[in-house]
């Protein structure tokens, strides 16, 4: 009897020994991330301020019949200092006239202006974890991308017709830079809708979990 009891005790002890370290079942569970969407919202507001500044500058350029000679001299000073064929104030004024006529300034101003307005509305909503804020920001950034790239292309075409030297490269780079910046804004605004943890914060954990189970 004692031997049987000893064996049963030993077997009981062996059965109670865990095979490996035990972790809580929910330690790897995805939790709602409220900080992520709020951080994105703050970055979008900063981006909207910069976009609004560029929109105002292009609106002013579109409204100006002629640029101030002093402003033009500042613009062409650096390119002329690099040697080669010199640009005159009249050359740049001609570029300005062609650029205004092409609608490039107006396209950039309206596209970026619309983007800034929508992002200024959407970013605070996103900060309050309202998914509508992300959608408005995506729409605004998309409008800014289309208007900014189209307008910059028109300005680049005007530069090809009237300018020469380093300013040609400058306007070409500005066209690409505008596209890259607005594409980055779109990607930033889309992030909270594609990240599972951020979606939980925006839509609620139950809804996101239900969608995952159905998929």
Image (tube, helix red, strand yellow):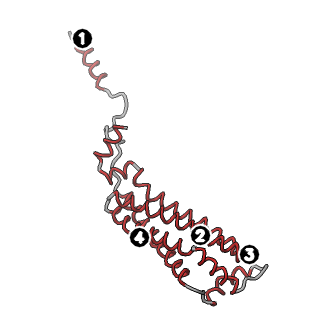
Instruction: Determine whether 94 is above or below 22 in the image.
Output: below
Q: Tag 1 or tag 4, which sits nearer the N-term?
A: 1
The tag earlier along the polypeptide, 2 or 3, is 2
The x and y percentages for residue 90 are 69, 86
Element type at marker 2?
A: helix
Residue at the spot of label 3: 165
Residue reaching furthest to the left: 1
- The CA span between labels 2 and 4 is 20 Å
Give the CA distance from mark 2 to mark 1.
90 Å
Residue 56, relative to residue 176: is it above or below? below
Task: Work out whether mark 2 precedes mark 1 in sequence or the reverse, and give the earlier one.
Answer: 1
Determine crowd level at label 4: few under 14, some 14-19, many 20+ residues with C-alpha closer than 10 A. Answer: some
Q: Is residue 161 left or right of residue 146?
A: right
Q: 164 or 49, which is in the foreground?
A: 164
Mark 1 crowdedness (10 Å alpha carbons): few <14, some 14-19, many ≥20: few
Residue to which mark 4 is pinned: 117
Where is the C terminus found, in terms of image quarters?
top left
């Amino acid at each position: 009897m004692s031997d049987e009891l000893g064996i049963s005790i030993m077997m009981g002890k062996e059965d109670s020994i865990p095979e490996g370290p035990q972790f809580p079942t929910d330690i790897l569970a995805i939790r709602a991330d409220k900080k992520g969407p709020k951080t994105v919202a703050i970055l979008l507001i900063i981006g909207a301020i910069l976009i609004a500044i560029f929109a105002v500058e292009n609106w002013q350029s579109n409204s100006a019949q002629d640029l101030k000679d002093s402003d033009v001299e500042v613009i062409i000073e650096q390119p002329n200092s690099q040697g080669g064929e010199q640009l005159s104030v009249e050359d740049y004024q001609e570029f300005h006239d062609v650029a205004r006529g092409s609608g490039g300034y107006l396209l950039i101003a309206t596209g970026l202006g619309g983007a800034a307005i929508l992002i200024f509305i959407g970013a605070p909503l996103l900060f309050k974890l309202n998914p509508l804020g992300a959608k408005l920001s995506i729409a605004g950034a998309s409008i800014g991308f289309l208007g900014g790239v189209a307008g910059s292309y028109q300005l680049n075409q005007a530069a090809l017709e009237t300018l020469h030297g380093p300013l040609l490269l400058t306007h070409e780079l500005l066209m690409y830079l505008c596209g890259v910046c607005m594409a980055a804004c779109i990607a930033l605004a889309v992030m909270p809708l594609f990240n599972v943890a951020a979606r939980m914060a925006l839509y609620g954990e139950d809804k996101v979990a239900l969608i995952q189970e159905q998929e």
